C-alpha cells in the first residue's frame, strides 16, 4: 500500500506577545518530508534566533546524511545526530553573542521517507507530537519539564503536574547541556487515516487532549485544521505564541 501525506501548518503571534518566538517548517525533499515545530526561549530576539536555527540546521543535516540509509536504527541515529548538531551550533552561537546568551528552543519533528510505511517522531522540551487514530489520541513525545520529571519520580501525580508551578520549566531543550546523544526517536507504523499533530505549548497548554482529538478528527482539510486549532487556542485564552503542523496519512491514488 503506497502512502502519501497531506499537511497543514499555522503559527500565530497571539494576543499577549510582542514577537513570535515559534518557528515552523515543512521541508519536502525528493526522498523525504520533514515537519518541524520549535518554541524559542531566551528573551528579546534570542528565542526567535534559536527556533529559526533549529528548523534550518536539522533538515540540512538530515539531507546531508540520510541518502542511501534504509534501516530504522540507522535512520534514528541520523535523526539524533541532526538534533545534537543543532544543539551544538545553538550553544556556540549563544557563547559568541552576549545578546543571545541563554537562548534555547524546544523542537518536535516528524520525518517521513517517501515510499515508507513508518513515521519517525522525536522531540525535546515541551512541544509535543500526537497520533490520532481510531478516534483515540496518543501523546508520542515526553515533556522535558521539571513537573514531568517529578511525575516520573512519583513525587506528584499527572493531574498535579498540569497546574504545577514547574510545568513550564524545562531541564532539556536545544541550547542546553542535557541533550547528550539526542532524544529517543519513535518509529510509528502507519495506517491510512492516521493523523499527526505537532504543536507548541501555546496550543497543548490550553486545549485538552479530548478537545484536540475531536478537532483533528472532524476536520477534512489539514490546512483548515491547523488554522482552526490555532484560532481555537486563542479563543480559549492562550497567552503564548501558538503553532502547529497537522498531517494526514492517505493511500496514494
Image: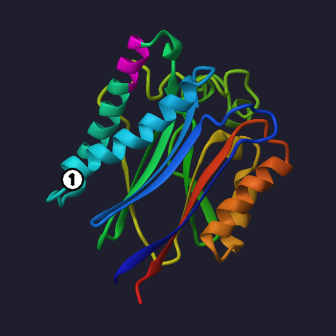
Secondary structure predominantly adopted by residues drawn in magenta: helix
In the depicted view, which residue is nearer to us: 105 or 165?
105
State the colouring used for the structure image: rainbow
Residue 185: within the magenta?
A: no
Which residue is under mark 1? 66
Residue 92: within the magenta?
A: yes
Q: Quadrant of the C terminus?
A: bottom left
Q: Secondary structure at mark 1?
A: loop
Above-or-below relation of 91 to 107: above
Total numbered labels: 1
Q: Residue at x 35, y 39 (%)?
A: 57
Give, as a single range, the part of the protein colored magenta: 90-96
Q: Quadrant of the N terminus?
A: bottom left
* Residue 163 picture location, percent across and down: 76, 30
In the depicted view, which residue is nearer to us: 216 or 67?
67
Above-or-below relation of 38 to 245: above
Using the rendered image of the protein, determine whether residue 160 is visible from the camera's viewpoint. Answer: yes
In the depicted view, which residue is nearer to us: 127 or 6?
6
* Residue 47 picture location, percent across and down: 56, 27
* Residue 105 picture location, percent across and down: 51, 30
Amino acid at each position: 500500500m503506497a502512502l502519501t501525506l497531506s499537511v497543514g501548518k499555522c503559527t500565530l503571534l497571539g494576543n499577549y506577545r510582542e514577537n513570535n518566538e515559534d518557528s515552523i517548517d515543512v521541508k519536502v525533499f525528493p526522498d523525504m518530508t520533514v515537519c518541524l515545530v520549535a518554541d524559542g526561549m531566551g528573551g528579546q530576539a534570542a528565542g526567535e534566533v534559536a527556533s529559526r536555527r533549529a528548523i534550518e540546521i536539522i533538515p540540512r543535516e538530515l539531507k546531508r546524511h540520510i541518502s542511501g540509509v534504509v534501516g530504522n536504527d540507522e535512520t534514528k541515529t541520523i535523526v539524533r545526530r541532526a538534533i545534537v548538531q543543532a544543539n551544538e551550533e545553538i550553544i556556540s552561537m549563544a557563547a559568541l553573542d552576549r545578546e543571545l546568551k541563554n537562548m534555547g528552543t524546544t523542537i518536535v519533528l516528524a520525518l517521513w521517507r517517501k515510499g515508507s510505511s513508518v513515521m519517525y517522531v522525536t522531540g525535546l522540551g515541551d512541544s509535543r507530537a500526537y497520533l490520532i487514530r481510531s478516534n483515540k489520541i496518543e501523546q508520542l513525545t515526553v515533556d522535558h519539564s521539571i513537573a514531568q520529571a517529578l511525575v516520573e519520580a512519583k513525587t506528584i501525580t499527572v493531574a498535579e503536574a498540569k497546574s504545577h508551578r514547574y510545568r513550564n520549566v524545562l531541564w532539556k531543550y536545544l541550547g542546553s547541556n542535557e541533550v547528550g546523544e539526542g532524544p529517543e526517536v519513535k518509529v510509528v507504523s502507519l495506517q491510512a487515516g492516521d493523523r499527526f499533530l505537532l504543536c507548541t505549548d501555546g496550543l497543548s497548554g490550553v486545549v485538552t487532549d479530548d478537545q484536540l482529538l475531536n478537532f483533528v478528527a472532524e476536520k477534512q482539510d489539514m490546512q483548515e485544521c491547523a488554522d482552526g486549532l490555532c484560532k481555537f487556542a486563542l479563543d480559549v485564552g492562550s497567552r503564548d505564541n501558538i503553532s502547529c503542523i497537522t498531517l494526514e496519512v492517505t493511500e496514494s491514488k
